[in-house]
Image (cartoon, rainbow, N blue to C red):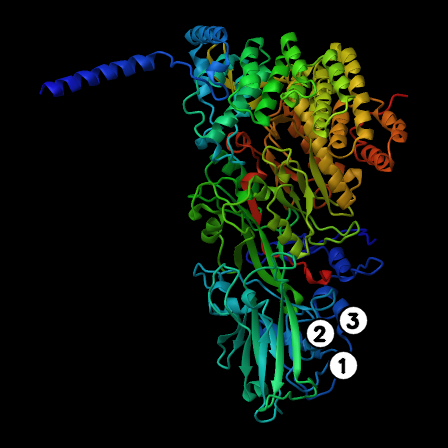
Amino acid sequence: MSDRKNWRRSGRALALLGTLLSAAPALAAGGVALDVRALPAGEVQALERDIRDFKATHPGAFEALRTVRGCSEAGYRAARNPVPNCSRELRRLGPGVLLPMLEALALREPAGLASSEAEKRALGHALLQAIGVARDPRALPVVEAVLLRGARRDAETLAYAGEAIGLIGTDTAVALLVRHSAAGDALRLPAIAGLGYARSLKTARHLVGLATQPQPPEDLRAIARSLGVLSSSWAWRAMGPKADSLGQQVRAEAAGALATLFVLHGGDVREEAGKALLMAALPGTRAMLTSMRSLTDADGARAVDKFLSDYKRLLPADPL
Amino acid sequence: MTRITRLQFAPVTKGAAGQVAFDLRAPISLLALMACIGCSTATTSPISNLTGDSGAQDSVTGDGAGNDGAANDSVGPDDTAADAADATIDAKPEPYKAPLGPIFATDADRDGVVSFTSKLDATFRGVGTAEAGASFLANLDDDDDNGLEDAYDLKVNGAGDELDLARVRIAPWKEAPNGTTARLGLDSVSGPNVRVWRRLSEGTWKLALGASAECKDVPQCDSVDATGLTTADLRGGVELGVEGRRFRMSAGPKSWDGTVQLSLDVTDTSGAPVASAALPKGHDEVVLRVAPWMTFGNMDVFDHVDSASYYPTFVKGIKSALANTGIEYKPYTNWNDQWTQDMFNTGYTTIPGPDGVPHGMRAHHARPWGRQDGAQWLPIAFLRTRYLGPDTAIFSVYKKASSGSTYDSYGNHDLAPGSMLGDVKYPLGRIVHGTGTLPEYKAFYDAQAIQGPSLVVKTSWLAVGHIDETTSWVPSQTPRGWKLLMASDSLGKDLLEEQAKKGNGGVKFFIGLKNYDPKTDKLKDAVVSIDETLADVDLMQWSQEAEIETEGQRVTLVEAFKFADDEIVAIPLLTEEIGGKIAYLPGMVNALVFSNTIVMADPFGPVIDGGDLFKVYVNNELATPKHSIGLDGKGMTTVYVDDYASYHVALGEVHCGTNPEGAPALTPWWPLGR
């Protein structure tokens, strides 16, 4: 009898504990891309405080995050390509859900958004993409930690982290990417990828400088792609007319380096440099490539001719 | 190079509905040119010259060295038709008379009748060429409607099934000496892939050669490769019916090449060859090939469109588009896949029927994977319950169930319509598919040889990875007879920029899904203005990248089809990145096309002066004579369906959610000789 009473008492105590625990925020163990120990303690405390304060005034933002379905099986099973993908949903929610997204990425895996390893990985990628385009410097410590000490070390995750840092684009963010873009750095490729999104003349010049160094084709390809992404920011005039002058400088620097890569290298480097040249869409590209035919061999000359012929519709007219 | 100067279409009366429609699959000039493949100039022969017993084929058969008294009967799938065909043959000035003896005859002259009065039928012994050669069907329909493909059981399933057997005859040799017998043989390679039936005197069929067990859809099967014929058999003549258990799956050296070789050895009681006028060495052999599978494209005539029934707005839109077209629409229930285009590839297969008109069946093949685990959720199971039946075959190309990826969905496998322009002739169209498909698909398409070799266009840059996301094909009154629609992100941007310059930059439009609004702490529909869209550096970058990749696709297509610039019409789009590119605006180019109608996603673009910016633009491109688009060149009927919630947000559009099919094309494949 007394044993039974004790058992009941214990049960009630456990239930009470459970209620208390569910009412309080769970202790942070880590999000879908980061073990919480990878963040400096001060950053964790600051982030927890920001999240707590924001949750008090904006509970709807956290609810909004929970509506995302594309990374859970119930959501993606019916998608045309039935693999976990919630990038569009997360990005569409907008920068107002930055703190819920940082919480999910770094502090606590959100319930119901992703279960399997593949789903969590996809959620991590989507969070990095959405956090990146929010361009909020508050996200830098978390994204930096994902790049440097994240739980997932695969090339794709690191590239998304690098790109997010580039999109945040503060001096600190760019300095971090520049540092890791040095030859031999283990994070060189994601750093180079990220630099393409840090839209400045300084970044362009840094990438152009990298392009002139001897290095593996994989690295050259990444540099070419980043120069294309960078130039693209101005090519379609999304930066507005006030940025045209700066854009012209960036595109000119990038196109010169890309044309050199195109004529001097074959294979994937040439292909990527060609695409990047089209992204830069600099008037004069046709004349520049034609003038550089003499620098290359017969294959290179043929590649120049084919490129100019195939993509004539996308190459702007040369200035008179 | 042969070039069509003017494309005409043969009117065809559609049976049950009694409507007269234009069969785009039988353009007169295409047929004429097909008969003249290898000629140096185009011809304008009327269609009747090519489908009857005269014309191009007759010029080959009209040898006229014959005599009376030889085997002169004929047999065809339909006695009346056979009689009619024979009457035509008999009307020729000098009919061929085969020499006496137990020789084979096939429908090598492709008039749908096996006749010993046709020199080709009686003497042609090679694999098919442009001029001659017999073929047989992969008999994968279910004429007795018992749920099992006709080729998978050990019986001939009624009169309908008899029509699907390619006939081979051994001429009656009334003078056969007593004791003469024969060995009827089948090459061992084709044995498991075919069945050869023998018609008995009472009109029933008995298995003679080939696969001797049901084996269902298993390629390997025990087979019988020889059977004996008695003296009485030889004296009375023998009628055989050949059916395939499968299509030719690959042109690889280890694969069945799609042919079947029948042999006949006539011997006396000692086993020594018995000579006859027809067979001096007592031996004959003949080759038939399995008919190719061919897929449908946008220019084909459809009588049925399928889609899921789950989204009332979408279903209502498709139903409305199909109203009064004579095309049946019965959306399916009880199946867990709304991506109807992706689940199965519709097509057909044919052999020459009476009067040379193609006879065959619809034939649809299934994607390797389903949306839930378990064989019951594989698309082949869907086809089995919904499509398999009389004159509708189902089959699969994949080697392993549940293999493959998004690239093996059939939105990634399309058909460029028939074209005689360029160096290689594709009167029945050419298969165009994206990258990443299972190798057995390309092997299969290429092995059919009619609509292949398939053209591979890069689609790996797309998140879904399908060719239908960026291309579509529409009829036109131009030398080629059709034009290509291609998505254009620069056009999408230009249209918005133009409005921004006109002062309409503040006009907002819905971009799908929900935004979180911090001011209200609630979700709201995501809308943006034209100016905001143009200032979105991420969206512009993604769209520019998509433009470049699409241009790469265009380069591949132009190189293959030699398109002039005005043969490609741009359709506006903007694209976003989700780990691969996906339509940001609803993808209008991803459209259902039938006859003179194109059904597109409603773009929900900015409304200016009472009209949707993108709809107004597209209507001006496609629904007017501007580009000579449409069956009469005066434009197509454009229909917009709201697919936002049902398909666009789930990464697809109208084409992805629908799948049309029709009766086998009336254009014969055999004059291609490949």
Q: Is residue A20 visible?
A: yes
Q: Residues within 10 Å of mark 3 (few under 14, many from 20)?
A: few
Q: Position of residue B219 (x, y in %)?
A: 53, 60
Give how far across and how far down residue A34 sits, in percent: 49, 19
Which mark is nearer the camera, 2 or 1? 2
Q: According to the image, label 1 marks what residue?
A: B94
Q: Residues within 10 Å of mark 1 (few under 14, many from 20)?
A: some
Quadrant hosting residue B587? top right
Please give the name of the residue rendered at 42% of the width and 14% of the height, measured from the top-left corner.
Answer: A28
The residue type indicated by label 3 comes to Ser
Depth check, front residue: A282 or B117: A282
Residue occupying the point 41% across, 22% down: A111
Distance between the alpha carbons at the discs numbered 3 and 2: 15 Å
Q: Callout 1: helix, strand or loop?
A: loop
| Res B124 label | 2
- Say which residue label 3 marks: B59
Q: Amino acid at mark 2?
A: Phe
Q: Are marks 3 and 2 on the same chain?
A: yes
Q: Position of residue A23 (x, y in %)?
A: 33, 12
Ranked by sequence position, the earlier of labels 2 and 1 is 1
The image shows residue B561 at horizontal and vertical percentages of 76, 45
Q: Residue pushed farthest left? A: A1
- Amino acid carrying label 1: it is Glu
Quarter occupied by residue B133: bottom right
Question: How far separated are the C-alphas under marks 1 and 3?
Answer: 13 Å
Q: Earlier in the sequence, mark 1 or mark 3?
A: 3
The residue under the point 71% across, 51% down is B418
Name the chain letter of the residue that bears numbered label 1: B
Q: Is residue B286 above or below residue B253?
A: below
Element type where label 3 sits in the image: helix
